[in-house]
Image: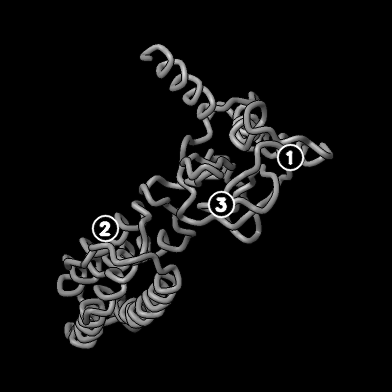
Amino acid sequence: MSFKTENSNPAQAFYLLAEIHNHLHNNVIRHELSQIARHTKDREIKEICKWAANCLEIIIDTRFSHIDYQQCKHSFTTLVKHLKWAKEKFDKVVELVPDLNQKWIEEPFKETQLLLLDISNCITLLDREHDIYDQNDRVIKIGDLVAVHCTDENNKPYNHYGIVVASSRGFRVAHFFTGETVKAQNSLVEKGFGYIHEVGYSLEWLVQEHLPKSIPYSDVEDRIKASRKIHRRVWNKLSYNCEHWAREMFTGQPECTQLKQWKEEIRNKKNNE
């Protein structure tokens, strides 16, 4: 009969664990977490980066620099590769542990295992599309009512409205206009045939209202699809303009807050004369 003898020398396992911790603390993770945190406005992503840093008891730079999703993607890929190396080393420790005296190896083994698990969970959570924010730092969601600042033919400022829609190319804005596609500083004629157009979302489109939870986005999609089928629809600055259309797609009711404000200003001016 043969008996299994415990190896009282855990040096090899300790050496591997030391390699793992040196690898995790060699500033690669610190640098890449900082790169992600500095190149996104996604608040949840930033918190995950801080969480991962806390696991290693390191401090990262979270001061926002500018949006760069390619940098975030590159840093995420680097983190995955870096962690993979540590996991492969830990697998070798796992093979050694059963033959070792547990009083020496049990505690450092468990602590390293938990550390790798926590960091793995953090990095897994970083693997998603980042939230997009407008220039006022409001998060953009599908179905949002948005507007871009423009000026009319009299150089008077107004907001051109649209709806954020989802597409295979990312967020886009569906809007109702007449003449050329509306852009910041372009003017609109008083009346004409209206068209529904889509443009890629850009930061100039500011969130006015988020789609209420009581209204499913599918309802907005259905209204936009139905609106596209209406041919030669008349755009009218006073009775049915871009905001009328956008709010109709948004809630089902055409409304123009700017027109109400304009009428109120005229009444106040007359009352003060």
Which three-letter amino acid code belongs to the residue tagged 3?
Answer: Asn
Q: Disc 1 and disc 2: Cα gap in Å?
A: 55 Å
Label 2 or label 3, whichever comes before in sequence order: 2
User: In the rendered view, does 195 fall on the left or right side of 35?
Assistant: right
Q: Quadrant of residue 66?
A: bottom left
Which one is in front, 162 or 232? 232
The residue tagged with tag 1: helix, strand or loop? Answer: strand
Q: What colouring does the structure picture have? A: one colour
* Tag 1 residue: 192
* Tag 3 residue: 186
Q: Quadrant of residue 122?
A: bottom left
Q: Contact (CB < 8 A) between labels 1 and 3?
A: no
Q: Badge 3: how crowded within 10 Å, few (<14), some, or many (20+)?
A: some
**Disc 2 vs disc 3: which is toward the camera?**
3
User: In the rendered view, does 139 fall on the left or right side of 224?
Assistant: left
The residue tagged with tag 2: helix, strand or loop? Answer: helix
Which three-letter amino acid code belongs to the residue tagged 2?
Answer: Trp
Label 1 or label 2, whichever comes before in sequence order: 2
**Outermost residue toward the front?**
273
Label 1 or label 3, whichever comes before in sequence order: 3
Which one is in front, 175 or 119? 175
Can you give x and y, in whole percent of width and height, for residue 171 in the image?
57, 54
Can you give x and y, in whole percent of width and height, for residue 19 in the image?
23, 84
Any part of residue 114 in sight? no
* Tag 2 residue: 51
Can you give x and y, in whole percent of width and height, for residue 17 in the image?
23, 80
